[in-house]
Image: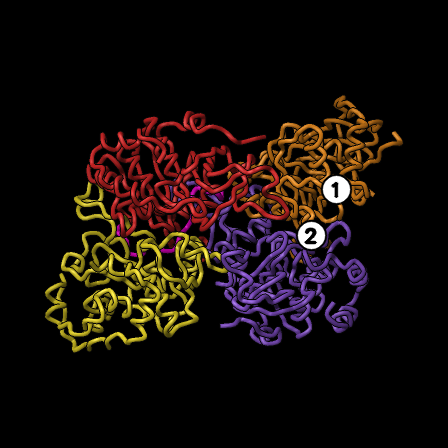
Chain colours: A yellow, B orange, C purple, D red
Amino acid sequence: MSQYKPSDLLTISIARALKGAENCFHGVASGIPCIAIMLSRRLHNPDLVYLNITGGVNVDREICEVSTDGNSLYEDSRSSFGLTDIFDLAARGGLDVAFLSGGQVDQGGRVNNSVIGPFRQPKVKLPGGAGSAVLIPNTKRAFVWKSKHEKRGLVERVDFITSQGNVKYVFTPLCTFEMVDGSLQVKERMPGVSFETIQENTGFAVEDNGAPEMAPPTLEELRMLDEIDPQGFRDLETR
Amino acid sequence: MSQYKPSDLLTISIARALKGAENCFHGVASGIPCIAIMLSRRLHNPDLVYLNITGGVNVDREICEVSTDGNSLYEDSRSSFGLTDIFDLAARGGLDVAFLSGGQVDQGGRVNNSVIGPFRQPKVKLPGGAGSAVLIPNTKRAFVWKSKHEKRGLVERVDFITSQGNVKYVFTPLCTFEMVDGSLQVKERMPGVSFETIQENTGFAVEDNGAPEMAPPTLEELRMLDEIDPQGFRDLETR
Amino acid sequence: MSKITQLHTVLEQIQDGSMIALGGNVMYRSPVGVAKALAKVGKKNLHLVKTAMAMEADLLCGTGSVSTVSAGFVGYETQYGLCAFYRKGVESGAVQAQEHACYSVITALRASAYGVPFLPIRGFNGSDLVDAIGFKTVKDPYTGEELLAIAAMRPDVGVLHVQKADRFGNCEIIGSQYEDQTIARAAKKLLITCEEIVPDDYFGAHKKADLSGVTVTWVVQLKNGAAPGACPGYYDIDHETMQRFKTLKTPEQLKAYLEEGES
Amino acid sequence: MSKITQLHTVLEQIQDGSMIALGGNVMYRSPVGVAKALAKVGKKNLHLVKTAMAMEADLLCGTGSVSTVSAGFVGYETQYGLCAFYRKGVESGAVQAQEHACYSVITALRASAYGVPFLPIRGFNGSDLVDAIGFKTVKDPYTGEELLAIAAMRPDVGVLHVQKADRFGNCEIIGSQYEDQTIARAAKKLLITCEEIVPDDYFGAHKKADLSGVTVTWVVQLKNGAAPGACPGYYDIDHETMQRFKTLKTPEQLKAYLEEGES
């Protein structure tokens, strides 16, 4: 286990889940999905159409900055298919996967990026859900990720519902949750992570449903991950 | 009078009326307005923003084809501001002048480009109003032109109202009508054209309101007209 | 994954009764080649959609392939006058002219692209088209203003003819793009015909495509695919062919013309 | 007619209480230079509009210049975290956060560009934002479907920072255009700040502008107008300045920072 980090596991679990997807999108502040998408395209889904805020399409290059809406994700692209286009695509039912994070995510797959406390004069103003209020309901499968698996971020009931809808998975460094009958269930535990550990770090009741451990990262996955992100930008989020 | 043709008079009368306009647009099959706009920009309104279907902006070159939606009205442009942009501009109240023609134009400034006879299975199917049903009401001033001044085209009441609204002028080779209190009145007669001649060729009652003759084309106007349209494409419509 | 295929393969996937949106404008970069192919294989009950169209509508009406035309303008320009076969079709009742303002065609396509069943539009005040077509109104829930509502038109297939395309469907468009970008986003499937296929490195950091391949379904090389109309950078209007086409009077003459070959 | 002018001349024409739409995205080509200038001359009660903004909102909230922020996301990215002055403003009640999805900002701007008071949108199902913001619904008159309606936002001024512009307002944008095209059409007046003014023959048959000057009101040369954010082709994010900016805690410190100069 020493040869891989929590960020590697999280990124690889996402990359694997993108198998079979036709197109996908991530927004701002989405380093882990950005790397996972590139990894998935190199590993097992070369035809996956990769969209991002800049309009860059299928950009595949070494990650050189922490931002995920800058020129490095646009420059090499053959064409431009911008944010407005992506929202429209989702609205007409054509977006397969969108990545979203959330300050709070609850057991019902609801996401809060808006406020803790009252909406006007909140206790904590969060940065906002960006596109999530339309993307989570409009995208075929919304992939939520939490770079840290903590009680305060994985709650029984969010303070405010910024968005809900077609959440398919919630990825964390400890496990992957899947929405089953409107409720998050463990689908896969990270190698060596017990249900007890997951429960200790989760704000809602986690059922021991016998979900298996994820197969450890392969050498190929780890090698490609380092090729894509040699500077380890993926660690910035999980640290 | 031998040194100018009906098409020259019509074109020049339109060019003069564009004095003071900020921007203007013509669509397909609009040779006369196209030439008139270029003439106006060269003569007395250099800041007039000239828009057309192709997205070309302020194109100013010798007319080389009869069409007014081809590459010659786009190629040299510094930027592109296409048809959709123009319609949107008009819809938000930003378009000064739009040029429209009509199979039938009536005394109330109503225009028919749709049908003669019933709408389904018409006696004559006209080509359609193109943008007129939105441009005539949305543009600040709609400029209608009739390349031929004939009874069948200038009628008391159109068979079908394709569009109506902000018609300001109707230009013909015999005169310029202006909308006054919801009714077309002669504003200017072409040099040497009497009210009787106008009435003989008009399907609605023309009042002898003492409207003056238009000042004859100047040598400068005629020279520039020939520079812009040396091949005489403007005659195709009036013949 | 290459999107390059053959025209006959695409034709097999276009059903009778399809709504087809056409790119270009009047005699410029209009997908006449595809229209000819649709006419030749005997498609029926097509619904053609475009702001301002000409030969596509004319020849497909002439072969009895069209049930409905939704357009703001159907005609050649000054030089070649009206579309005779289209007119005959409408005047006989065989073809339904869903006459639009060009802007309402754009708005209907935008609604499709935006995934909504309608969009409000400004215009049509006092137009008989409102009742003739059956446009409905909608009330702005904020101001109470009553606006005309345009129902979405979601074409089964969009067809654009462009100068160059790569195997991913990225296109270079020389000259005006007209409403091609909107069609590319409104249609369920998108067919690109092109004069030339370009290699993978034609587009990139040095040169972005004018139209993204993201919404493209098929790429077919079809030289002279806009002829006898113009395709900037490749050919101008073929006046000889146009003059001959305009002499055709009967469906039989039209059929013979279509059998002659690709121009 | 040249649209080139000086920034102070434009500032005089921007009223307190104006709605201002901002181009670029987060730390890229955002018109930070104009935001600084607005803050320095003490504009009040501004309503800022943008899909995803950062420093413009942060510093204008810090100087008490903002009453409302309509945005989908307000924050730096991973590296520089949240916008502290903005947060403080909202949490104190001084600033109203009209939280949108980025798509509803785009839709509100589109409505303005299309001259209609609202547009229907797909999305927001089950979101508490609907009641919190007071979004209303509208019924499609054709299908009866109930959709969320987004009211038009018509900015008094749009502000875009670009790399190059000519005196007519035609712009070259290097890198992503983000939502600049929509802002250019939605705003009543449009201010372009640019790194460089280019001569009249820079754009033409050989090279079309990325953004047409047709909707541009003013062109102002403002070097480093996106700094400490990035302006592709000219400069990257100025991490040193950003780190220092993030240490500012009080309005007084912010004021001192703004007085220091242009970067």
The spot of residue D128 in percent (x, y) is: 26, 51
Task: Characterize the local packing of mark 2: few (<14), some (14-19) or many (20 or more) Cα atoms within 10 angstroms.
Answer: many
Q: What is the span of residues highlighted in magenta in the rendered image?
A: D109-128
Residue C199 drawn above or below residue B59:
below
Question: What chain is tagged by disc 2?
Answer: B
Q: Tell which subunit mark 1 falls on.
A: B
Q: Residue at x 19, y 60 (%)?
A: A148
Callout 2, which amino acid? Pro
Q: Using the image as rendered, state which of residue A171 and residue B203 is in the foreground.
A: A171
Packing grade of label 1 (10 A; few <14, some 14-19, many >=20) is some
Q: Earlier in the sequence, mark 1 or mark 2?
A: 1
Check contact, mark 1 vs mark 2: CB within 8 A: no
Q: Helix, strand or loop at disc 2?
A: loop
Asked if residue B85 lies in the magenta stretch, the reply is: no
Residue D119 is covered by the magenta coloring: yes
Report whether residue C252 is seen: yes
Q: Position of residue A45 (x, y in %)?
A: 39, 72
**Gap in Å between the C-alphas at discs 1 and 2?**
28 Å
Q: Which image quadrant for residue C40?
A: bottom right
Would you place residue D81 above or below residue A90 in this image? Answer: above
Q: Position of residue A199 (x, y in %)?
A: 12, 67
Q: How many marks?
A: 2
D52 left or right, relative to C230? left
Q: Nearer the viewer, residue A94 or A153?
A: A153
Residue B62's disc number? 1
Q: Secondary structure at mark 1?
A: loop
Please state the horizontal and vertical placement of residue D139, each as a whole percent of the image: 40, 52
Per the image, the residue denoted by label 2 is: B127
Splitting the image into 4 quarters, where does residue A229 fall?
bottom left
Quadrant location of the C terminus of chain C?
A: bottom right
Q: Does residue D48 appear to the left or right of B41 in the view shown?
A: left
Amino acid, disc 1: Glu
